[in-house]
Image (spheres, rainbow, N blue to C red):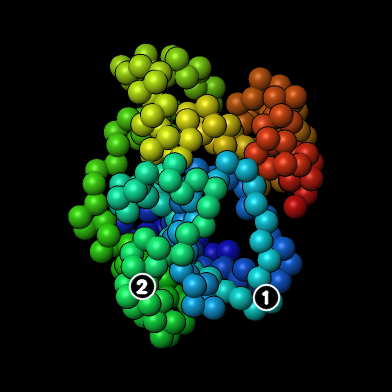
Amino acid sequence: MTERRPDADLIDYVKCIWLADVGGEPKTLVPDACIDLLWIDNGDTWLCGPETTAWTFALPTGTTAVGVRFRPAAAPAALKLDADEIRNVRIPIDALWGDRAARELSGRIYEANGQCARVAVLGDAVRGRIADAQPIDPVAREVADRLSRLRPGPVRSLARDIGISERQLHRRATASFGYGPAVLARILRVQRVLAEARSAGRQTGLAELAIVAGYSDQSHLNRDIRAIAGTTPGALLAS
C-alpha cells in the first residue's frame, strides 16, 4: 500500500489517501479507528465502517484499489451519518448516495488515466461532501486525542476532565467512532504496538513493546491483541 498526504483543504477530515494492490493472498485488516471510502477496479465503491475486530478478505490476483481514509470521528461529520450505524460492515456507496451518484463516481474513477488520477477523482468526491459537512464533534476530537496518548487514564476520569457524564461520553463516542471510549482505547493501543514494531524491527521483544505502547504488562498486551486481532501477538507481528 502507498499512502499520500491529503491536500490542505482535506486534512482536517482525511488522514491519508492511498492506493494498493489488494489481490492475491488473503489479507487481514486490523481495526484502526478509521473509516475508509474505497474504489476497487471491478467497479465497486464501498464505505468500510469502523471495525471492532480484525477481518480477512481475498480478491483475484491483480486487483487494485484506491481509497480515502478518514481521521477518527471525521467520516460521520463529513458523510452525515452515525458511525455505529455502519459498525463492522462494508456498505456499497449506492446505498448511501443513490444509484446515479454511485454510478457516476465509479465511472469517473474507472475512466481516470492511472491510479494517481483515480485517487484524485475519489479525493474530489470527498471534497464535495466536506464542502457542507457538519463540524467534527469537539468531544470526539478530545477523546481521540487523549486516548492516543500513553496511559490516558480511566474513562470516568476522561469524562470528568471533559466536563460531561460517562453516559454522555459513551453516547457521543459511539456516534463518532462506532463504539465507546473503552473499545477505542484498546484499538489505539494495538495500533501503537504495530507502529512500534514496524519502527523498532524484529529485535524488540513483546515485553518491551508492551511498555513502550502503554500497556501495564505483556499479559495486558496479549489480551488486547487476542480481543482485537483474534490471534497471538507473535503471529500478528509475524504477519
Q: Which residue is mark 2?
A: 99
Quick check: 31 left or right of 58? left
Quick check: 236 left or right of 145? right
**The disc label shown at residue 17, or none:** none
Q: Is residue 168 above or below residue 59?
A: above
- x 62%, y 68%: residue: 22
Viewer can see residue 204: no
Q: Is residue 118 above or below residue 111?
A: above
Q: Is residue 33 above or below residue 111?
A: above
Q: Residues within 10 Å of mark 2 (few under 14, many from 20)?
A: few
Q: Residue furthest left?
A: 132
Closer to us: 39 or 174: 174
Tell me residue 76's x, y (percent). Answer: 35, 47
Ranked by sequence position, the earlier of labels 1 and 2 is 1
- x 62%, y 37%: residue: 190
Closer to us: 115 or 209: 115
Q: Secondary structure at mark 2?
A: helix
- x 36%, y 72%: residue: 99
Indicate the amino acid at tag 2.
Answer: Asp
In this rendering, the label closer to the viewer, 1 or 2? 2
Q: Secondary structure at mark 1?
A: loop
Q: Which residue is mark 1?
A: 60
Closer to us: 220 or 214: 220
- x 64%, y 25%: residue: 215
Quick check: 20 left or right of 137? right
Q: How many marks?
A: 2
Tell me residue 194's x, y (percent). Answer: 64, 43
Indicate the amino acid at tag 1.
Answer: Pro
Tell me residue 127's x, y (percent). Answer: 28, 62
Tell me residue 227's x, y (percent). Answer: 68, 35
